[in-house]
Amino acid sequence: MIFISKLVRYGSIAAAIVGFYAIFMISRTQAERQLPTSSDPPIIPPQKPYVEAVAATGILEALSENVAIGMPSPGLVSSILVKVNDLVKKDQPLLTLDNRDLLAEQLSTRAQHEIARAQIAVSEAQLAKLNSQLSRLGAVADSRAVSLDDLENRKQDVAISQAQLISAKAQLAATESSLKRIDLLIDRLTVRAPRDGSIIQVDVRSGEYAANTPKNPAMILGDIDKLQVRADIDEQNASRIRPGQAAHGYLKGDPTVTFPLEFIRVEPYVIPKTSLTGSSTERVDTRVLQVIYSLTRPSDPPLYVGQQVDVFIEAPDHHPKP
Amino acid sequence: MIGLALKMLFGDTAKYVMLVAGLFFATFLIVQQASVFCGLMLWTTATLRNVAAPIFVVEERVEQINETNPMRDTDVDRVRSVSSVRWAMPLYSGIQRVRLSDGSFKTVQLVGIDAASLAGAPGRMVEGRLEDLRLPNTVVIDQLATTRLASNPKDPSTKIKIGDRFEINDVEARVVGICEAMRSFTGGPYVWTTYERALQYTPPSRKMLSAVIAAPVKGMSVEQAAADIERTTELRAYVNHNFGKDTKDFNTSTVWWYIRNTGIPISFGTTVVIGFIVGVAIACQTFYSFVLDNLKHLGALKAMGMSNVRLSMMLLFQAFTIGIIGFGLGLLATSGFAMGALKNGQPPFFMPWQIPVFAFVAVQLICMLAALLGIIRLSLYEPAMVFRA
């Protein structure tokens, strides 16, 4: 009995001491488990180049703006004459569309042409025949031997035949111009470069159907020696933008690539924001002011048309200081 | 005198055990329940711990991190345009459903972070490289997900490993990393991916940006920068330190939201109060009867000329000793519970230093109350009564 009460007494005291120690250890483990508090991100985002700046998201474009090559008419592509990165001169053929329907029409028109030509020969022969008949009648000295009616008929026949000849010639001219028209139409199916530049994108292969939708052009032509940045500025910050403000661009994804930007112009029309972030379903109710800056391509690393750029524009903060 | 007091105390083992047990239960109930409550409240701010950014910018009327009102994508640029902001990045945070290879569904907390800077990335990687998140269709999961998303959570061989795949809303997700993360309040594991991909995983809605995370320029305080952001953008900018008095702190704001809007504090608070009452009831009653039992001895001491003050000191010392021992035993039991909880990550357990201190004060209060009853009884006792009996 005494042993048990001793056990209870010292046991409880010992257990209490262990309890204090254990709770201390628990709070230490707990502190170790705590996740590190706020720190810089693994890759330091671009530093702002200016104290007061408006941030914008931009996209790289060819300086003269990209030309989405349009198709004269929707049709099958029969051959592509250029490759991506090719330098092209103005009026250089880029691609040809299938023109077999026009060639077929050309064939039949050519036949028509031959028929028209033959028709002229027929008409001429007819006229010659009637002329000779008329001249033979006219050569009869005795006027009683030929009826006046007969003579008049012959004259009329000659006049009709002359008119027929003119008509046949007109027919020939018509088939000739129709041939020229077909030639023009065939030529139209060869798409040519509207100006000098390089091919930035080819999104069509021979055998494919090229539609003339402006959203996904078959080819994009641009001048990629000099690039421009189209920066989208939220309309709420638009009032801070003035022409000629200095700006810096940072390549999205690599904040170490930075380049100064040269102001070109502010687009006078504020447009609904288009999604650059990749989510095609984003619906927006905000409009953006677009500002255009030019830049010369840095030699390294290469910049590509269509890349996203973080833009900082030096613009004073109009908000009142507290 | 101390020796005498202790001898008297330990003399009756049954009463001693009874006293200690009462205080033990009081301590255990108070400390354990309060810690579970704190743990649960800490879980509500898990996103703020896991996405360690100094400033969270959210829509004007957002009060807590788990319920955000989406903003427009251009708001990132607006925050970035504030002079006090060094960097600002988009953040997506939302609950999504994952379909496993066997067809079952689990919910996860999906976090989308900026792909370039990886701002908002998990703090500690266990396995894999964070940079691999830039590969197509990749995610980083937390340790909880490795078992939670496994086809058989009890079988360690089916654990999710690097290279395993699952589907988030019918889009493939390939695991490239495993990280440490705090558990979320909803119980779903955390899954990190890039912001753009998070939008693909999520069913489209009009606006998708949950929050903008930002940091102040060097030399400026976080609070100042947050105030500047609020002033210029008219969005709500919260700082992210810790739960405290500051209502501009997102942790504080989130926890208070749960305290105001859920029954959690009432339920835990009731248990803590009951713990206190049980302690008071058992301890006072037992100590009083203990004093009654020993009244003869105490009376004899009194008759021998010991002053009331000294006798009171003796009783107080006895109560204090009992308090310490009962408290220690309660802490031992709580530690046992805590060890299990910390090991499994379940149930929630977080014990700030204030809890044991508060519990100690409460237990000592109970003891002093009990001692007071004894002292009153003793002071009314006439020494002459010892000889009358």
Image (cartoon, rainbow, N blue to C red):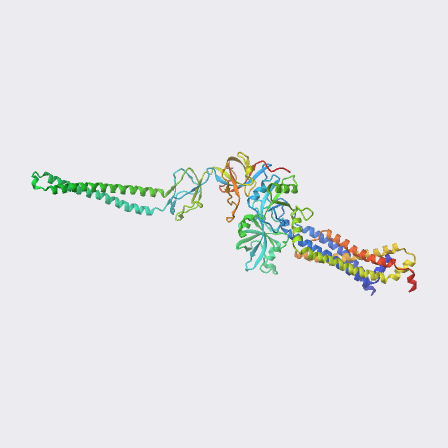
| Residue B296 placement, left or right of A161 | right
> Which is nearer the eye, B241 or A174?
A174
| Residue A198 placement, left or right of B6 | left
Residue B259, given in percent of the width and then of the height, sits at 67, 53
Q: Is residue B338 visible in the rendered structure shown here?
A: no
> Which is nearer the eye, B11 or B253?
B253
> Is residue B323 placed above or below A302 in the rendered structure?
below
Residue A57, given in percent of the width and then of the height, sits at 54, 41
Residue B83, given in percent of the width and then of the height, sits at 61, 39
* Residue that appears at 51% across and 49% down: A281
| Residue B95 placement, left or right of B28 | left
Q: Which image quadrant is residue A162 in?
A: top left
Residue at the front extreme?
A149
Q: Is residue A194 visible in the rendered structure shown here?
A: yes
Residue B53, given in percent of the width and then of the height, sits at 62, 46
Location of the C terminus of chain B (image quadrant) = bottom right
> Is residue B191 placed above or below A165 in the rendered structure?
below
Q: Which image quadrant is residue B282 in?
A: bottom right
